[in-house]
Image: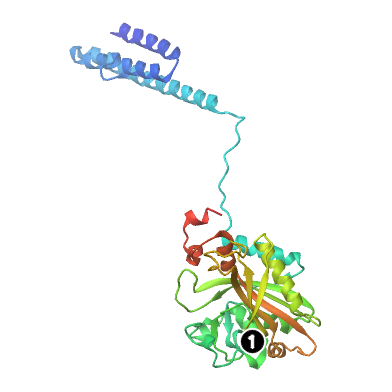
Amino acid sequence: MNNKIEEIKNRAENEIKNCVDLKSLEDLKIKYLGRKGEVNQILRSLGDLSLEEKKIIGPRAQSLRNELDTLFEDKKNEFLSKKSRNSLDITRPGKKIKIGHLHPLTIVENDIIDIFKSMSFSVIDGGPEVETEYYNFDALNIPKNHPAREMHDTFWLQDNQKQLTRDTKQLTESRGSKVSGQKLLLRTHTSPMQIRYMETHKPPFQIIVPGRVFRYEATDASHEINFHQVECLMVGKDIGLSNFKYIVEQFYSRVFRKKLSVRLRPSYFPFVEPGLEIDIQCVKCEGKGCNVCKESGWLEVTGAGMVHPNVFRAAGYDPKEYQGFAFGAGVERIAMLKYNIPDIRMFYSGDLKFINQF
């Protein structure tokens, strides 16, 4: 029996060494270590041996099984390693690593900022989102009884002291008694930054202020409770509507990457005089009429106008010395037109199938 064990060992080692692929290696393993394999046959035959023979043959047979099992595993790893090396094509380009990308609103906002920077506008931080009634309404010439102050438009904060953030405290305390004890709210537009900037800067200047704003209203395909605006303000001694129209035409033509005509219509906004509605040539049909512009050829995009004298007075300017214009562009509105997005709520859905398109 000892001779047979030695003979199986030598033969198995030689066959394993000369094995050429994984399939033949697996066949050999079954041949020697399978349920009916040669090593198991020796182990099953131990019952026919004497006690003394069992003590000798049993450990040798088990040792042989362990040795062959190790040899089979080593040979298998050798084949797998060789296969891995042979399958590597070092001439193939590497796989592109997914590192994420910008949200469509960020893409559009960055584009807007770049356009205004190219026209020598300065970009100002958006300021506090928790705003005082003074900066959001009073200083912008919005009367106490104006509908915009009602709850259906504004998120008023119930506990002013608890809701007053450190940054807002610092900004309001420096303004003195005119803002002390003021009710707080989530700002409804970026226009409060007009007053905040003018209080600490002297004309001439031209700025934009990107930021998030909030409205207390029902959501639908074209309305959200929070959205983004880019406030534009230019002030100087000889600023007129001709400057305003040129900036607006340049901005919308560049943001939509096509030459677009602009139409100005009279309108009312408390913080400008005269107030204007800005219409641009439809970006889809270019004025011919389609479903986007409701066959009119024009799209209403924003409100604007020349800064109201009372707003200048609130900021400490002499309205007889300085003139300026202001308008606020909606980032979501531009993105929806630019990318043909039908529902504003898609921007905030978190749906990766939507986000990954950009």
Amino acid residing under circle 1: Leu
Judging depth in this view, the residue of 165 and 335 nearest the camera is 335
Residue 44: x and y in percent read 22, 16
Viewed as shown, does residue 277 lie left or right of 312?
A: left
Residue at image coords 34%, 10%: 8
Name the quadrant containing residue 166.
Answer: bottom right
Judging depth in this view, the residue of 27 and 137 nearest the camera is 137
Viewed as shown, does residue 116 lie left or right of 284?
A: right
Residue 321: x and y in percent read 80, 88
Viewed as shown, does residue 177 lie left or right of 217?
A: right
Give the crowd class for mark 1: few <14, some 14-19, many >=20 residues within 10 Å. Answer: many
Label 1 SS: helix
- Residue position marked by numbered label 1 in the rendering: 140
Residue 107 visible in the snapshot: yes
Position above or below: 1 against 263? above
Position above or below: 83 against 146? above
Residue 103 visible in the snapshot: no
Residue 95: x and y in percent read 57, 39
Q: Quadrant of the N terminus?
A: top left
Q: Quadrant of the C terminus?
A: bottom right
Residue at image coords 70%, 82%: 306
Judging depth in this view, the residue of 265 and 350 nearest the camera is 265
- Label tally: 1
Q: How is the image coloured?
A: rainbow
Residue at image coords 78%, 90%: 320
Residue 294: x and y in percent read 53, 68
